[in-house]
Image (spheres, helix red, strand yellow):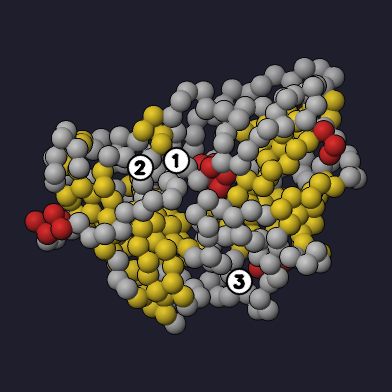
Amino acid sequence: MQIRVVALVALAVLLCGCAATSSLRDDSAAAQPTPIPWISATPASLLLPTPTPTPIPPGTRVCRAADLNLVFGGIGALTGGQLSAGIIYGNRTATACVLQGLIGVKLFDARGRQIALTTAPADGMSANLILVQPGTADVQAHTPMAGVAYTELHWDTHDGAGNPCVPAPPQGTSLAVTVPGDQASVRVVVANDPLDRWSAIIPCYSRIAVSAFQAWPAPEVVPTPDPYAALAISLDVPATIKAGSLLRYTVSLRNATTDPINFPDPCPVYGEWAANTSAAFAKNFYLLNCGPVRVIEPGQAVRFAMEMAVPSGTEAGTYTLAWNFAHPGALPGLPGTATVTVTR
């Protein structure tokens, strides 16, 4: 079973980094007036290595709601204007239990009123039997832990063509979750994501896709710093962009160390995200066009041209654009961020 980076991003926000940002223009980039052109090359895969399955002893009991500690794992962006939330399941008891299948979900607004939902199985996620180890009740959001399970919720933020949903959907601030074979429900409060972008589940047309239970393994090895984490990232982004047009901006990578930083073959993968507190219009992954510059010398800054489509249905407003290297299994440095205002 392959654990998708998208899932771990939603739960751990691995690729975007955390609080601090780097958005100031890099004056040393003036020595390179023409940025290296953008290319549309995409990575072959963003999957982490497949973990070794944990054997399930014969006769292991099925988990009941009372056995489990549920933790909201945060909200993250998927591609195509979708958002994703994770729910993590730890075991309060002294014996292992198993989970399999789809949870039942009810969504409630801030006044406790139930929001009508249409649910369907999420695509591309396996439905294997998942072992939940005993003594894992201290599971925490954004912290990988062996022997626990998680599920994902996916929903659209627009009508499929980039247009706002009409009427505007209600905001869900809590969930009632039931596990297969148990009628008892557990209430889970929707929590802010680490970057304070989303604090509610707002599914377009009240449709949510629900994943089967997945295993969330602890890393087999301690992640190492990304080899490019020492590069200072700064963005030069237009102040405004019209919905339905192409956003062209530049990224400056400056080597603030005393050692040269070499690019490998193939070039590294980067991710770019554009979102505000209620919507997201981009989450893309590409290969950096590092062919013309295989090494960045100490003190040198290199500018790279970037292109990002702004869907025609994107709501007017101010969005945060974030850019960072996306090296699976590594700890990236701080992202570069800037704001851009979308107009209609």
Image quadrant in which the N terminus is located:
top right
Amino acid type, mark 2: Gly
| Other-residue count near label 1 (Cα within 10 Å), few / some / many at <14 / 14–19 / ≥20 | few
Front one among 189 and 161:
189
Q: Which of marks 2 and 1 is nearer the N terminus?
A: 1
Q: How far apart are marks 3 and 2 (CA)?
A: 35 Å
Residue 64: x percent and y percent? Answer: 85, 35
User: From mark 1 to mark 3, how far is it between C-alphas?
Assistant: 28 Å
Camera-nearest label, 3 or 2: 2
Q: Which mark is residue 305?
A: none
Residue 126 seen in the figure: no
Task: Please name the residue shown 75% across and 65% down the image.
Answer: 109
Report the disc number at residue 333: 2
Q: Which residue is drawn at 71% across and 63% down?
A: 172
Amino acid type for the residue under numbered disc 1 = Ser
Count of picture labels: 3
**Left or right, 146 with reference to 289:** right
* Up-down relation of residue 112 to residue 145 (above or below): below
- Neighbour tally class for label 2: few under 14, some 14-19, many 20 plus, Cα within 10 Å: many
Mark 2 or mark 1, which is nearer to you?
2
Q: Can residue 297 be seen by looking at this rendering?
A: yes
- Write the residue at 49% across / 73% down: 314
Q: Mark 3 points at which residue?
A: 159
Residue 45: assigned label: 1
